[in-house]
Each structure stands twice: as structure tokens, then as C-alpha cells.
Image (cartoon, grey):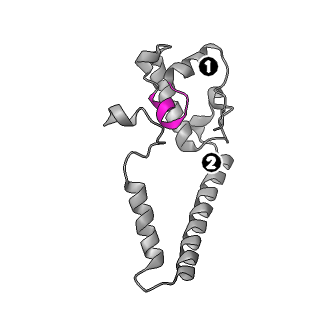
């Protein structure tokens, strides 16, 4: 399966679990009682607002707090711009870059293709130029 999923941007979503989870959450909001269109609309709107609030809170947490492992000079331009999870993925890729070097074929560029984050061979290039990994927004 990785032969296919590692060739497209999926941001780590390779199963239907997130969709099923959202559907389950929606069913809890709606319940089993009969609804008219307006009340159903308001229930869905309320659920979405709660999700947006939770996501915003998580993003603010990522902006305010910096984990010790993320204090590396190479991550200076990324801190506060991407999530702690994404920074962790880049750290793993930095560790992998010691074995990969600048060889693109050895790298495979999976992190770049699936999540839009710099992959091992790109990180080596930033390290050799002694500069931090730049933030390139989507």
C-alpha cells in the first residue's frame, strides 16, 4: 500500500478513521430524534464551531510553547509556523539525513510528497549551507 500512498499528498491520513470519527461525532450531535432541516443545520453548525475552537486552541498552544527538542538553530524559522507534530517529523527526518546525505534516490522524498515538509536530502542541503530550514507556506 505504501507504494501508492507515498506518492500523493495525504498529510498522514491514510485510513478512513478520521471520516468515521467525524461521522460518529455528528451522529451524537444529531441523535435519533426526528429533525427538521433548520434544527439539523444548527446542530451541525454547533459541532463545526466546537471543532474550529479546538483546532484554534491547539494552534495557539503550538505558537506559545516551544518544546526543548525544537530549540535547534535549524528549526528557528519554522517554530511558531508549523505544529509540534510537524516539527517532530522534521526532527526524525534530520536524524535520517545523516544516513541519506544528498542522494535524492536514497531519500525517497516521502515526507515532501506526503506532507509537504522538507525531506532528508533537502535538510542536508540547509545544514551544509549553515542556515535554518525556511518556512514555505502553502
Mark 2, secondary structure of its residue: helix
Residue at the spot 56% in from the left edge and 35% down from the top edge: 69
- Asked if 7 appears above or below 25 in the picture, the reply is above
Is residue 111 located in the magenta-colored stretch of the structure?
Answer: yes
Q: Which mark is residue 126?
A: 1
Q: Position of residue 59 (x, y in %)?
A: 63, 51
Identify the residue shown where x is 66% and y is 33%.
135
The magenta stretch is 110-119
Instruction: Find disc 2 in the rendering and name its residue.
Output: 62
Q: Point out residue 15 in the picture as x, y percentages from the top left corner.
A: 37, 49
With respect to residue 50, does 98 lie above or below?
Answer: above
* Location of the C terminus (image quadrant): top right
Above or below: residue 124 compared with residue 54: above
Q: Is residue 99 visible?
A: no
Instruction: Give the quadrant of residue 32.
Output: bottom left
Residue placed at 60% from the left, 13% from the top? Answer: 128
Magenta span contains residue 74: no
Amino acid at each position: 500500500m505504501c507504494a501508492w500512498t507515498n506518492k500523493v499528498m495525504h498529510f498522514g491520513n491514510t485510513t478512513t478513521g478520521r471520516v468515521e470519527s467525524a461521522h460518529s461525532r455528528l451522529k451524537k450531535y444529531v441523535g435519533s430524534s426526528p429533525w427538521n432541516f433548520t434544527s439539523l443545520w444548527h446542530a451541525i453548525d454547533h459541532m463545526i464551531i466546537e471543532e474550529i475552537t479546538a483546532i484554534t486552541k491547539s494552534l495557539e498552544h503550538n505558537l506559545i510553547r516551544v518544546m526543548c527538542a525544537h530549540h535547534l538553530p535549524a528549526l528557528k524559522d519554522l517554530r511558531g509556523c508549523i505544529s509540534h507534530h510537524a516539527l517532530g517529523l522534521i526532527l526524525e527526518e534530520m536524524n535520517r539525513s545523516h544516513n541519506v546525505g544528498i542522494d535524492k534516490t536514497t531519500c525517497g522524498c516521502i515526507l515532501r510528497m506526503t506532507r509537504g515538509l522538507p525531506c532528508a536530502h533537502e535538510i542536508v542541503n540547509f545544514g551544509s549551507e549553515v542556515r535554518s530550514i525556511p518556512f514555505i507556506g502553502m
